[in-house]
Amino acid sequence: MRVLHLISDTDRRGGQVFASDLHDAFGRVGIDSEVVALRAGSVGGLDVDVVGGDRRAPATYARVRRLMASRDITIAHGSTTVLACAVAGMGPTGWRGAGAGHPFVTRQLSETAFWVNTRSRRLRVSAYLRRSRLVVALAPGAATELERIVGVAPEKIRVVPNGVPATRFVPPTPDQRQAARESFDLAPDAVVVAVVGALVPEKGVDRLIDAAADVPEVTLLIAGDGPARADLQRRAAERAVSARFAGSVPDPERIYQAGDAFAMASRTENMPGVIIEASFSGLPTVANSVGAIGELVVDGETGWLLGPDDRDGLTGAFRSLLDEGERGRRGGLARTFALERFEIDVVARAWENVLEEAIRRP
């Protein structure tokens, strides 16, 4: 089987990193796989070929079409790649020949309600997804939303969770922990809450800063960059929050090695791989229950799972992190839980089955 992975850009973000990790997992079992990006990213970090500068230019579609033609199946990783695959993979009779062109499977990344938030967008996405042989949701709830909001036929939806290479993220030794903390200028005895993600409003880093302001014993270690960075730094300074802004970090395992826990307070999310990475690293997670985060965090066991807008709960969870024994107990359970469900080779086997079915599908 020959597989093409099409990602939106070369930025080191969740969907793009997963495509690269799945490509590597396919290679380990002898599947011929290639990853390309529609355009260069604003931050970068992934070393993959770029199709073109303008993702909607005719030349870009032409190159995507040639690449799709050279493969048995293409995976469109995320919303911006679905249009390219739907148009570039079109059969000779256009939209009417929906199954006769170059086949592709869509992997949904964002929450459907956030991604498809207007009637016109809903109609467009519905048209694109009709061209897709199958649509892969990351969790059962996400599958239901695809059916309810976009109108994807349930027989076209498959559920495959997010996955991460467990070998890359392991609990640190004492020496690794000390070295990681020194590299970020963190006190050896600080209670460090790791945060990894794009610095954009929907990721809710402002909520974490507000919670940390009420628990001064906590230090935030924030990895990532984006348009909200300056505002977040100003917010942390105004609230006298102990926060380290590390910027884009090419090796996020150092962030987890320096941390005592992981936190995410997103306003919208699907199934973030960073929670899996933190769990493999032995960290408990504090998170709001949005999207499929409830599939990743077991409240009271592997972390603290809060309501979508529970600020008081977030502050209370940060106070609970001051108990070293409780952090250690939940972190150990988090690693065991994640290893059983979200290791990339396990997820890759499920993906192989989906792609083989899509190729056979009329």
Image: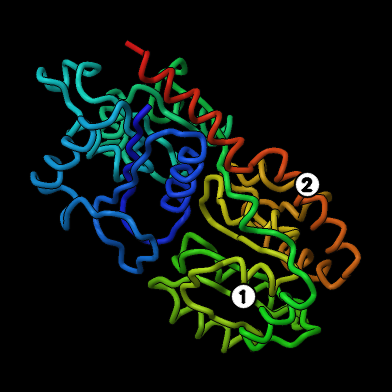
Q: Residues within 10 Å of mark 2 (few under 14, many from 20)?
A: some
Q: Which mark is residue 336?
A: 2
- Closer to the camera, 55 or 74? 74
Count the labels in the image.
2
The residue sitting at 74% across, 68% down in the picture is 172
N-term mark: 1 or 2: 1
Q: Is residue 91 above or below residue 192?
A: above
Q: Quadrant of residue 282?
A: bottom right
Relative image position of residue 64 (x, y in whole percent): 19, 40
Q: Which quadrant is home to the C terminus?
A: top left
Residue 126: give x, y in percent of width and height.
31, 28
Quick one: SS at disc 2?
A: helix
Q: Amino acid at mark 1?
A: Ile
Kindly state the secondary structure of the residue where label 1 is placed: helix
- Name the residue type under label 2: Thr
Q: Residue furthest right?
A: 325
User: Residue 48's spot in the image, x, y percent?
Assistant: 32, 55
Note whether 36 is above or below 75 in the view shown.
below
Q: Is residue 100 left or right of residue 352?
A: left
Q: Is residue 110 above or below residue 142?
A: below
Q: Is 325 left or right of 344, judged from the image as shown?
A: right
The residue sitting at 46% across, 18% down in the picture is: 154
- The numbered disc on residue 209 is 1
Image quadrant in which you'd find residue 200: bottom left
Q: Nearer the viewer, residue 108 or 32?
A: 32
Q: Relative to the observer, which residue lies in front, 249 or 107?
A: 249
Front-most of 120 and 334?
334
Color theme of the render: rainbow
Point out the image quarter for the N terminus.
Answer: top left
Q: Quadrant of residue 178?
A: bottom right
Q: Position of residue 2 (x, y in %)?
A: 34, 31
